[in-house]
Amino acid sequence: MPGTTLRPTCPDRPEAVLHPGTKQPVTPDDLAPLFPMALIMQEVSTEPYIEIPEAIRQIYTQWRPSPLHRAHRLEQALDTPARIYYKYEGVSPVGSHKLNTAVAQVYYNKQEGVKKISTETGAGQWGSALALAGAYFGVEIEIFMVKISYQQKPYRRNMMETYGGIIHASPSDLTNAGRSILAKDPNNQGSLGIAISEAVEVAATSGGTIKYSLGSVLNHVLMHQTIIGEEALKQMALADDYPDVVIGCAGGGSNMAGLIFPFVGEARKKGLKTRFLAAEPMACPSLTKGVYAYDFGDTVGMTPLVKMHTLGHDFIPPGIHAGGLRYHGMSPLVSLLHDTGILEAQAFHQISVFDAAVQFARTEGIIPAPESGHAIRAVINEALEAKEAGQERVILFNLSGHGHFDMGAYEAYFSGKLQDYEYPAEAVASAQQRMPQVV
Amino acid sequence: MPGTTLRPTCPDRPEAVLHPGTKQPVTPDDLAPLFPMALIMQEVSTEPYIEIPEAIRQIYTQWRPSPLHRAHRLEQALDTPARIYYKYEGVSPVGSHKLNTAVAQVYYNKQEGVKKISTETGAGQWGSALALAGAYFGVEIEIFMVKISYQQKPYRRNMMETYGGIIHASPSDLTNAGRSILAKDPNNQGSLGIAISEAVEVAATSGGTIKYSLGSVLNHVLMHQTIIGEEALKQMALADDYPDVVIGCAGGGSNMAGLIFPFVGEARKKGLKTRFLAAEPMACPSLTKGVYAYDFGDTVGMTPLVKMHTLGHDFIPPGIHAGGLRYHGMSPLVSLLHDTGILEAQAFHQISVFDAAVQFARTEGIIPAPESGHAIRAVINEALEAKEAGQERVILFNLSGHGHFDMGAYEAYFSGKLQDYEYPAEAVASAQQRMPQVV
């Protein structure tokens, strides 16, 4: 297990984060009501490597290094000359990569005496991870869960309860943000942006007793995930192979960044022509259809402004089954990689995603999370392209989690109830008009 | 990964298996309608070790060797001097130990040209495992699922469908066995014994085109699972430690046997005083309350007669949430170990089992299957006893699977809806009268 996590080697540092009120660059002190100082310093650090503390490494040993598998049986089924490798993050006790950063974040909070943390969750992967990390360190976790997921995924809720988390359906009547949204639309089904507004408000108005935690998007979160790619670099070397293309699904961007950043660094260092590919849903295509501009991370406008690919902070995506990819924005670091041409992006319809996920389950045995299914769709397309062209191609992707809590989505797929949604073109223009004005 | 699986070193060979009609010892030919010859020869083999074929080992490498963990955080929470180790079988793609034998069984069937296999499943762990093994080898799998589980656990059903399995609720109207039970009781909720009757009938009346597969109880099934204990022996040696007590939950007996048999052999070889402990439910206590006698493996009386601890072949246990432990009988080899005093047994109420399972989840992170929760209850009791006595005690147990498809049971626990059932004492006497007569 590598002892450090890595920042990406980007062509430039990302542009400054702005205060939501003054529109001036934020200082560490501006962020102090929300985050412990250690995480703020990681957020703004320019160090290439930051050591992982021993207490975190000790917990990681339960499931790390996560396995790197060669998808032999999938390759056979596709009859492709491509060699397909996947890093499997579903081996963590919560079943996804999210626990990597959850453990780190709760650890640093605990170090600074924090006793309670608020957060939001969409599909429930993040909420489960933070609830368990809270149980590990004895820190209370309060979770705002997007209402449609809260209703569709009771077992994910039960999982968070089993870990001792406190869960609310969002929008709730517990916050000003929630109440104002419910006043306009009592049947609002929620979104990640709304849930973020609620969780941020709880921390910001707590007088310092509650901190806030985010499961993706931010620099320090992506950095905690780079252990995935650091391990994969060593594991690919053991396999005596190296990827031509590295693929991840992208919602906020953290699982993909975790895998690809170390390979981006390697490509830069050695002048390699490695391709990098983000797979996202047609229904929420922030990289392929969003604008690259300063926007809020939440719906109400309480968070700092970050420059990112965004569909507009008030965009509420349709209720597709990959809840972890239903976010209006994209991590600033990932957005920058895309903007500079290092990262390609493709968007997929959800039925084609489940076609790929089921083919993967029947060959490799692991039932993928619908989010990870997007990466698998891209992988199978690449493998079939290689076959068509009669080329060798080495493909590496991140299987970010299993789908054990998403079987309702598989049932919908088998019973023909799944629908494809496409983000309408005119919405891009409209989103652009709603961007906050930054001089 | 050890290259062989092991037979247990028992004080005596188990007593002969009898033909259900003639009551005479069965011959391999009697079993040929149900099983491929390779498995029949394993069933009656007296070899101490049988090599695992390369094709099976290749598949095992995806999740084997399974990890052996030290439960440091649980030990701390219990403030016990005991050292607790667990072998975690939930890392298999289907989430339990069942895939070990499923892969082996489908492999040997495939070798003999079998294109379709029938089976039964209670909680769904076994059905999922066989469905996936069928997908691996291109063999069709038809599954009779106990009706109450079929209704309570739709996601487990969806999992089997994802792997391409064909699933029926049992009792069904597809077999004589099912129809005769429904004629007497149209609302019959099913039992493992009934589902076995249906699956056996499908194979026995297929004219040789369909074979039958059982996920526990039989000698060859237990033998396939001994890879668990073989690995654990090596892993304990790496940890420079050795168990004083080895614990497993017991339904049909296969996960427990898989862990303990190699340690039983080691104890015999070296004269060690290792204790062995089976944890079973109060609601279906075949070892602690059943009689040791010849009985049918199924409800209708189609299977051979085996000498085992049994609650009576027509016993239908209450609908507790550990579906994998709701079987009237116990593997003959495990029964013999108990009868000769090598194996202790304890029965637990389900609420106390969930108390233990939740404590485990909050400390170790893994949400246990309710079946495995029985083993954890026994482990925690042992650890608290050691604390009380101020003794060191090294405890090893098998965490046979995760509970991701059992969250409804956790919800019942948290909402206070769980009930404790106890197998009534008078039922033992009654069961004894219903045993088949064997001269």
Image (cartoon, coloured by chain):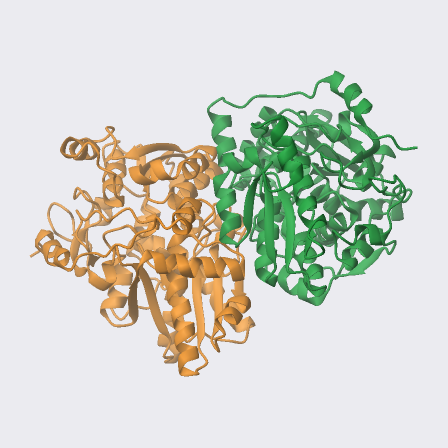
Chain colours: A green, B orange
Q: Depth check: give the residue in front, A46 or A249.
A: A46
Which residue is depicted at the point 60% across and 53% down?
A141
Q: Position of residue B403 (x, y in %)?
A: 45, 50
Q: In this view, does B308 lie above or below B269?
A: above
Q: Closest to the observer: B186 or A312? A: A312
Q: In which quarter of the image is residue B179?
A: top left
A5 left or right of A47 in image? left
Q: Which residue lies furthest to the top in this view?
A: A426
Q: In this view, does B135 lie to the left or right of B334?
A: right
Please tell me which residue lies in front, A226 or B198.
Answer: A226
Drawn side of residue B38 relative to residue B28, left or right: right
Above or below residue B144? Residue B247 is below
Q: Residue at x 70, y 45 (%)?
A: A200
Q: Nearer the viewer, residue B7 or B326?
A: B326
Question: In the shown orientation, is residue A194 left or right of residue B292?
Answer: right
Task: Give the quarter of the figure containing the C terminus of chain B.
Answer: bottom left
Residue at 63% x, 21% y is A421
Whether residue A176 is visible here, answered yes or no, is: yes
Residue B425, how many percent across, how many down?
15, 60
Q: Position of residue A208 (x, y in %)?
A: 72, 56
Q: Which residue is drawn at 63% across and 24% down?
A: A349
Q: How many marks?
A: 0
Name which quarter of the figure residue B117 lies in: top left
Q: Compared to A354, does A18 lie above or below?
A: below
* Residue A68 seen by the camera: no
Query: Could you say where residue B39 lies in the image, as x and y percent from the top left?
Result: 34, 49
